[in-house]
Image: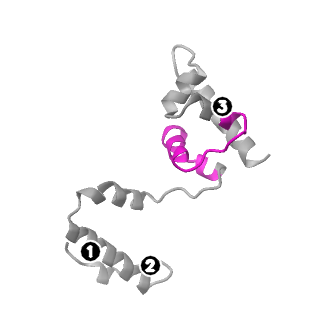
């Protein structure tokens, strides 16, 4: 089974689960709207004409589950990085510079990603 076929089956299965959780059977169009995509995009996915990519994968992950990332061959986003991105605009320029400098310093210190806790003590 190729990636698009597996993805199409997964999306269809999620559509059926969505329908069963409703009092009234929902249409394909309603499901597509709920997902945040057009009916044409949804149809392209289930008819294996397209595989979800980019922002569409995040939409599907948020609504249907993170397993979509492995189905389309993508690495799920790191929640720690997403938290930084979420709050970035609310940070002062000084705080942004400190975070950037810390990231560069940590990356240079240990290539395996392990951080030295004693060097991490720093107030912004």
User: How dense is the environment of label 3, judged by Cα within 10 Å: few (below 14), some, or many (20 and up)?
Assistant: some
Residue at mark 3: 43
Q: Is residue 44 visible?
A: yes
Q: Are marks 3 and 2 in contact (CB under 8 Å)?
A: no
User: Of marks 1 and 3, which one's residue comes earlier in the chain?
Assistant: 3
Q: Secondary structure at mark 2?
A: loop
Q: Quadrant of residue 89?
A: bottom left
Span shown in magenta: 43-70
Residue 86 badge:
none
Q: Secondary structure at mark 3?
A: helix
Query: In front here: 29 or 72?
Result: 29
Tell me residue 118's x, y (percent): 30, 83
Residue pictured at 63% horizontal, 36% vertical: 11
Left or right: where 86 falls relative to 62: left
> Picture quarter containing residue 122?
bottom left
- Residue mark closest to the camera, 1 vs 3: 3
- What residue sits right under mark 2 in the picture? 114
Magenta stretch: helix, strand or loop mostly:
helix
The earlier-in-sequence mark between 2 and 1 is 1
Question: Which residue of the protein is positioned furthest toward the bottom in this rendering?
Answer: 109
Tag 1, which secondary structure? Answer: helix
**Residue that numbered label 1 is attached to:** 98
State how far apart marks 2 and 1 are (Cα): 19 Å
């Amino acid at each position: 089974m190729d990636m698009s076929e597996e993805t199409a089956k997964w999306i269809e299965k999620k559509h059926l689960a969505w329908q069963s959780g409703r009092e009234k059977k929902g249409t394909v169009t309603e499901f597509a709207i709920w997902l945040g995509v057009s009916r044409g995009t949804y149809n392209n996915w289930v008819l294996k004409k397209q595989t979800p990519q980019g922002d569409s994968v995040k939409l599907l992950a948020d609504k249907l589950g993170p397993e979509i990332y492995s189905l389309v061959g993508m690495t799920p986003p790191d929640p720690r990085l997403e938290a930084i991105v979420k709050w970035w605009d609310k940070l002062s320029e000084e705080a942004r510079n400190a975070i950037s400098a810390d990231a560069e310093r940590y990356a240079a210190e240990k290539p395996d990603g392990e951080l030295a806790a004693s060097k991490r003590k720093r107030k912004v």
